[in-house]
Amino acid sequence: MSERYLLGTMLVPIFTLKLNHKINPRMVTIGKFDGVHPCLTAATQAGKVFIHNPHARGQRPVAHRLSQSTQDSDISLLNINQAVTCLTAGKLGSDTTGDTLLVGSQTNLLAYDVHDNTDIFYREVTDGANAIVLGKLGDIASPLAIIGGNCALQGFDYEGNDHFWTVTGDNVRSLVLCDFTGDGKNELLVGSEDFDIRVFKEDELVSEMTENETVTSLCHMHGSRFGYALANGTVGVYDRTARYWRIKSKNHAMSIHAFDLNADGVVELITGWSNGKIDARSDRTGEVIFKDNLSSSVAGVVEGDYRLDGQKQLICTSIEGEVRGYLPASKDLKGNLMDSSAEQDLIRELSQRRQNLLLELRNYEENAKGVSETNSGMGVIPANTQLQTALSVRPATEAQKAHVELSISTPNETIIRAVLIFAEGIFEGESHVVHPSAQNLSGCVRVPIVPPKDIPVDLHIKAFVGGKTSTQFHVFEITRQLPRFSMYDINFDSSAAPPTGRVTFNINDRPQRVVMWLNQNFLLPEGVESPDVTFNSLRGGGLLSISMASNGQITLRTDDIDLAGDLVQSLASFLAIEDLSAEADFPGYFEELRTTLTEVDEFHSVHQKLTAAMADHSNYIRNMLVQAEDARLMGDMTTMKKRYRELYDLNRDLINEYKIRSNNHNALLACLKSVNQAIQRAGRLRVGKPKNQVISACRDAIKSNNVNSLFRIMKAGTASS
Amino acid sequence: MELHLNRVDYIQVGVTSQKTMKLLPALGKKATQKVAIADHDGILTCFGMKKGEAVPVFKTLPGQKIARMDLGGAVGTPQEKIFVCSGSQVRGFTKKGKQFLTFEANLTETINAMHVSGADLFVCASYIYNHYCDCKDQDYYLSGDKINDIMCLSSENLTRLVPVLACQDRVLRVLQGSELAYEIEVPGPPSVLELFNKDGGNDFFTGEEILYGTTDGKIGLVQIGERSAATKWEIDNDKKKGGILCIDTYDIIGDGVNDILVGRDDGTVEVYGFDSSSEPTLRFDHILSESVTSIQGGCVGKESYDEVLTATYTGWVTGLTTEPQKAEAGPGDEVRMSKETQSKVEALRAELEQLQVKVLQGREQYQQTSQSSTAVSAVPVFSINDKFTLCQDDASYSLTLEVQTAIDNLLLQSDVPIDLLDVDKNSAVVSFSECDSEQPNGNFLLATYRCQANTTRLELKVRSIEGQYGTLQAYITPRLQPKTCQVRQYQIKPLSLHQRTHSIDQDRPMNRLSLVGQFSFAEIHSWVVFCLPEVPEKTPAGESITFYFHNTFLGTQLEANYCKGEGHFRSDNISTISILSDVLSKEATKRKINLNISYDINDDSVSHTLKMIHPKLEYQLLLARKVQLIDALKELQVHEGNADFLIPEYRNILDESANLLEEYKKQPAHLERLYGMITDLFIDKFKFKGQNVKTKVSSLLEILDNYELNSLLDFFNEA
């Protein structure tokens, strides 16, 4: 990245604070809790939230949850007594003077009035709260605090009523509200652990963008443009469904924020990195216009008028409690901040380009001159060498598991020294290397590829071609696309049991179009001519058969409900179908789900029993402690020792019980997640309106605990039949 | 006094070697000086700056790569004749560019160091030193290890010219005629020599002073006498900056005392000044993005403004000038580039356009040849500046790669288990690829580095395990069409963590391995070269040789003494002996040489080694325990509001937490490495007794988990 127009020396932090408290990553916000003074608020260790209020020094009530920090008089601590997982602040009530603080944990959501020191509401959220966003969504009248948990999204108003609930594909990691469609109303953008960014218009899923890692942060830039960050160090900007740019770093992006730092009227994407670096990048190009370094990993980047002078500052915080505020560049500079060292850099860049061109030219000249045959290290190859690549499906053998084989070969006596494949989402890292030993060099390399998911992937292949003793090689760069459904073999075992699961729907299109879709999305060396085909799933999912009747009815048979969903979605988008209802039956999967639902009930009752037991214990502890202390005051050391020994035992029991409780809770969470996923899966068998109907109907069925109705909906698409 | 220097780029030539740029003497006082620079294309360029533009004085035709440059002239006249060496030839040019000398040194090897003084010419090829006077052979010397640089002291105080050689085996060799007068031990392999003060020292009575820089980044000043030398001062490399490539002395601060200008291979430029004491202190540093190959103090850009002039590996000539930077653009104004810059930019853009056209033609022609069945594609070899060195501090190898144009990606492949460590400076995205070491391909490491734009230099760190040996290969692909990649190989030797040293402690309990057999001196030398780093490839002169080494990780030592038919290796570390014995017998078997191997094992040596490890291990364990507590203690502190209730030990941990964490981060996997070496020691001790104790390793690890020196010693004795 060229850093030519760095603000560099011009921008220095206007304030730096050392708060003697650690800050949990991504849990930083600014709230005006009294309606006037912005306070930096962040989650810290030991299940606490601190509120930094340097504006109103002096006495503040200390009661309820709030307590004054002994280390810093400007800081009040809020005791949550649970590990905080997310927090935000903003206007939730319509007639409140100040902002409401919202704090989420794995089990609860707290809405808190910092100014009046009271709870506004405290709700149990079984799906946890991994991310939170506050604002207006679609046509819903009141502002909502929307939390994203394990596959679920839930929105609460000021009274604590949930006005919004839907499910999504995987655990939610990031949320943002923005007018994605440009209709003047906010949509909800959801980034989750299945690498997808989903856009919800209220509870209707309108768009889906697939990335290649967990989406850890989202932020609204302007209009329909938003920034995103992934767990692998990627940050970038989307405008609607189109990605503008992205960059990848070896560090992790901890927090992203939109702020107009160079005062040119357009916000930049500010990223805080795990190595403490902060950079501001142009929203159009990703070019760095400013950077600075904190001494430890960035925890969060926010903005606020912290000096109360009417100007917003960009405020960066580190996990060690360092805070820095930056003012935007002065208006005079108009974003044109080229100083004389930038001139130097421009000249340097131009010279570098000239040097590169000269080198390239020299390459051609020397090549044209020809070479002496003696220099074998140079890796001379025939000029007409071209690489051939081929993709094919390979079923499992005894020696190797099933895979897609990429074979790369040279047409002549040259050898391939090594092959590098850069591709997203199918290897552990971003690349895969094949490097045969010196004895095994040949002109052909076969690379087994096992894509873990059904996604289309571009394989960027770099092959080093030369002679056996070369020290320099020609690099051939080729890009091949791996189709979405590449792990399905057309040569199936006819003796295998036919799948019991199926989904059926009708389309108004010619069979030829379906054939086209098949040929584009499956790895079919010879192609197919009829839409009736059967594949063997190489990931061990049994058979997959697709058939189309003359009336346009398509039946997909597979036991893998996810695959069925992927196929429906892929086919519908290929044929540009907006609404598609379907009937489905997946006996195996539904049976599993039924078991899960019973388990949920069991876990719930265990949970209640354990909670009651815990309450008993705490009473007991209180008594015991009083007795022990009494004994101490009376000088009765034997009894005191005895009591304390009992307390110790009790403590051990409590710890054990706690372990049981947390195991139970985790198991419950896993079950709830799979229930939420089931709803999502049932939805994915349909498209458009029928899809949303299925999801909301399923949700109602779960709310009313009507299991039979749930399955009916999943099968038929509606509750009434 | 604070020193502010501003960067100005002048021109770019081809890739440059170490010490190939000089400033010609100024004609008048305060006038600007001309710059002479020579590159790998064989071109010698001489230019001066006029109104911010580089105006060439002359430029020679391309030829063989130029390795060194020096200035000379008759004694007592300005030193303005330019001498360059390429291959085994030395050429001389006047300041106008007229060639007045072509001298064929008749060496079989290429000259890599040169010094000119009056009518005397001194040249060095890898091991050979030659002195010519008026192009006539005078003296000759064969050095024990590679010669990196040469400098001659000449002044009224010395009766003769005194040549000093900087040799790879950590010594400066002072010659007298064709004979070695004496050796000076220095703390690292010296890479560059320079006279301290241009007239060769100002201390009239005590002799002459010479500055040296080492490949591991240390600088020192020694005073050369007729029979012996004295070290005046040394600057350590605590901050782990790059190796020294060039030094100059010049009064850039302007306090009347010459300062030391230093250029390093990681792009650092430094200025050391002198306070009232005669110890140097760092006054200024600046980071250029690539190796600084030459450095000079003088006046180039503008009259009466002194500057530090540098040349870098890719051929950039850059000044760090005392001239203040122009005022920045005024408020509300459009960007104002100076006229000079503007015209420079325009000229460059015009040139770029022309080049673009030419390149397009070239590309087309190249494409056309791919239709032909007889044509071949042969892309010229691009130059790579690489360095693979053992860092003493953390006992790991650092690999630096530098290419004249931006690197696109790097593939690292190793057939021996090694760990790749993260380097903060390095911004490239690394990705580890799965590799089945079981398969016939035998890969233990396959990693790709995808570089950010404009990365011309990459730095990596690799950790090896002694006893596991093989080759690390780096495939470098620059962003240059037609795309090619080049492979470089680096040997991971069996005793990879050993480093050469000048002497060893003879009082330690030692184990001995002796070999007797029908092998020549050259053969056993080649085996030692195979086993140990930093041994010269050339078979030493004489009948026998002794080398000393120390283990950079554990501090144990090794003495290797061998001659024709006989070899003796002594070490206080039994594992070192075990590895040597395995590898040497394997090598001998390969050549079908029958070896008679005998051991002299000293059981005390094991306890001795364990006691040497003890402080390191204890420190690491304590550190790990403290670091583990930090988070919990901090939480308690927040919970209770303060830390007053904690015992002093814990409070201390809280106070020191930042330092502790930093220290801990600096030494990743240090404990595991120590455990591994103790385990090896255990297995090796009993191997020499003919016992296999691999089954007892788990009990050893248990003892290590609850480490206590005595119980460990007991376990070693009892098992």
Image (tube, coloured by chain):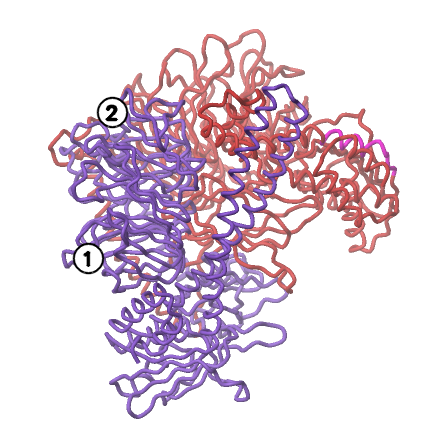
Chain colours: A purple, B red
Q: Earlier in the sequence, mark 1 or mark 2?
A: 2
Left or right? Give the position of B396 relative to A614.
Answer: right
- Classed neighbour count for the residue bearing mark 2: other residues with Cα under 10 Å, few (<14), some (14–19), many (≥20): some
In the displayed image of the protein, which residue is found farthest to the left? Answer: B332
Residue B214 painted magenta: no
- Note whether residue B57 is visible: no
Residue span colored magenta: B600-613
Do labels 1 and 2 touch, CB within 8 Å?
no
Tell whether position B603 is magenta. yes
Viewer-nearest residue: B415 or B671 = B671
Q: Nearer the viewer, residue B51 or B124?
A: B51
**Which labelled disc corresponds to residue B559?**
none
Which amino acid lies under the numbered mark 1 shown in the image of this protein? Gly
Q: Residue at x 37, y 33 (%)?
A: A294
Q: Label 1 lies in what chain?
A: A
Q: Which mark is residue A138?
A: 1
For the residue pair B347 and B277, the one nearer the viewer reads as B277
Dot 1 lies on which element?
A: loop
Residue A155 picture location, percent across and down: 28, 53
Residue with the most extreme bottom position = A550
- Do the residues at discs 1 and 2 belong to one chain? yes
Residue wearing tag 2:
A55
Instruction: Determine which quarter of the picture holds residue A716.
Output: bottom left
At which x and y percent is residue A251?
42, 45
Q: Give the Cα separation between the discs numbered 1 and 2.
A: 36 Å
Position of residue A618 relative to residue A664, above or below, is above
Residue under the image location 75 percent in, 34 percent down: B558
Up/down of B45 relative to B476, above or below: above
Residue A617 at x, y percent in the picture: 54, 41
Disc 2 element = loop
Amino acid beneath label 2:
His
- State whether residue A653 is above or below residue A165: above
